[in-house]
Image (cartoon, rainbow, N blue to C red):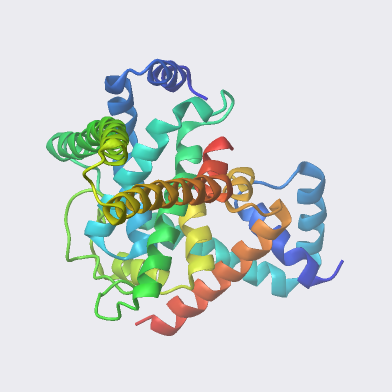
């Protein structure tokens, strides 16, 4: 194997992810290759430099504030679902009643009947179309795939 | 998976939000830090990491029993961050200091624990890497993910993880070398 082929293996060696057999093979290569040995040492130094960069440990107050924000979002999500479901039910019922009354009322002009019917049917078509689009996006959505892993 | 975490996950599956609160508190710092390196903006990082926790809660039943919560969460967080970066690119917001944040500017979760010339230099170099290199460096060094976990999160074979990591580290090394006082 050439040095180029050993290079990705060098990463697994540094990160202690190399199986025993490959580790031995890589170490044998290192014995005879000054260039890879030097590169390995440079990557080792880089790893040490990166290890010095650490994130702040949040205080208890910060963690509590963080969790409150997450919790509020969880609660709000449920609120939106209930609100949307309620609004959809009421709007559908209202549209049905309106349509029924307008169509049955002999005093309402034909143009108004056609207008109201078109408006309601159009709204339903738009809603179904949007819903279908959302479902299609959800099917190909990377998030839903990621969370399954 | 650790027993304590497994027990917490089980409680989450039954809808116990307090158990989820314990998990969130355990990982909030690391999660925000990783998001900060990917997004380069502290407020955005806080928001993205919280959004990822919300998504995790909603899908907690899909978390397989043999998979650790944090590596699963990281895949969600990565996608939330990438989505935001894509939206930013679409909006072409050139006025935000997204790509080169000043690590000394903020305090709180997700910021540098020890601020000195060297750590800030490394931090800046990481945030200036191209996205595909930055994310693998973040996963490997700051999220402490294994190669298997990175391969799962990125949807690539382990061999590609190794070669991408090699190129990302090489690039980072060159950048640091150029910037060395």
Q: Give residue B19's quadrant in the image.
A: top left
Q: What residue lies at 48% left-to-right and 22% top-to-bottom?
A: B2
Q: What residue lies at 47% left-to-right and 65% top-to-bottom?
A: B134
- Above or below residue A85? Residue B5 is above
Please indicate whether residue B157 sits to the left or right of residue A142 in the image: right
Q: Residue furthest left?
A: A61
Please indicate whether residue B22 sits to the left or right of residue B138 in the image: left
Q: Give residue B117's quadrant in the image.
A: bottom left
Question: x%, y% of residue B95?
Answer: 24, 80
Question: x%, y% of residue B150?
Answer: 58, 49
Q: Residue furthest right?
A: A1
Res A42 seen here: no
Please indicate whether residue A61 sits to the left or right of residue B65 in the image: left
How many numbered marks, from 0 up? 0
Question: x%, y% of residue B32?
Answer: 31, 49
Please indicate whether residue B80 sits to the left or right of residue B95 in the image: right
| Quadrant housing the C terminus of chain B | bottom left
A74 or A138, which is in the foreground? Answer: A138
A93 or B117, which is in the foreground? Answer: A93
Question: x%, y% of residue A129?
Answer: 47, 51
Q: What residue lies at 45% left-to-right and 37% top-to-bottom?
A: B70
Res B117 seen here: yes
């Amino acid at each position: 194997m050439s040095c180029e082929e050993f290079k990705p293996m060098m990463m697994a060696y540094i990160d202690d992810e190399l199986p025993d057999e490959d580790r031995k093979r890589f170490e044998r290569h290192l014995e005879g290759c000054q260039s890879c040995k030097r590169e390995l040492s440079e990557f080792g130094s880089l790893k040490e430099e990166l290890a010095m960069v650490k994130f702040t440990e949040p205080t208890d107050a910060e963690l509590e504030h963080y969790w409150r924000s997450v919790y509020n979002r969880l609660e709000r999500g449920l609120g939106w679902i209930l609100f949307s479901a309620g609004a959809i039910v009421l709007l559908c019922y209202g549209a049905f009643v309106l349509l029924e009354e307008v169509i049955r009322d002999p005093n309402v002009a034909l143009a108004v009947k056609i207008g109201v019917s078109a408006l309601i049917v159009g709204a339903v078509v738009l809603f179904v179309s949007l819903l279908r689009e959302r479902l299609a996006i959800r099917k190909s959505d990377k998030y839903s795939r990621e969370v399954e892993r | 998976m650790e027993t304590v975490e497994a027990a917490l996950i089980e409680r989450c599956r039954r809808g116990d939000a307090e158990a989820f609160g314990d998990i969130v508190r355990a990982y909030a710092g690391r999660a925000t830090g990783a998001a900060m390196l990917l997004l380069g903006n502290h407020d955005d990082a806080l928001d993205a990491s919280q959004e990822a926790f919300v998504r995790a809660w909603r899908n907690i039943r899909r978390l397989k029993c043999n998979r650790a919560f944090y590596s699963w969460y990281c895949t969600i967080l990565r996608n939330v961050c990438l989505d935001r970066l894509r939206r930013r690119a679409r909006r072409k917001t050139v006025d935000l200091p997204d790509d080169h944040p000043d690590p000394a500017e903020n305090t709180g979760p997700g910021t540098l624990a020890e601020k000195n010339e060297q750590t800030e230099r490394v931090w800046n170099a990481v945030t200036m890497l191209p996205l595909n290199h930055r994310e693998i460096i973040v996963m490997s060094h700051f999220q402490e993910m294994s190669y298997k976990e990175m391969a799962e999160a990125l949807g690539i074979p382990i061999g590609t993880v190794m070669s991408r990591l090699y190129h990302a580290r090489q690039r980072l090394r060159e950048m640091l070398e150029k910037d060395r006082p």
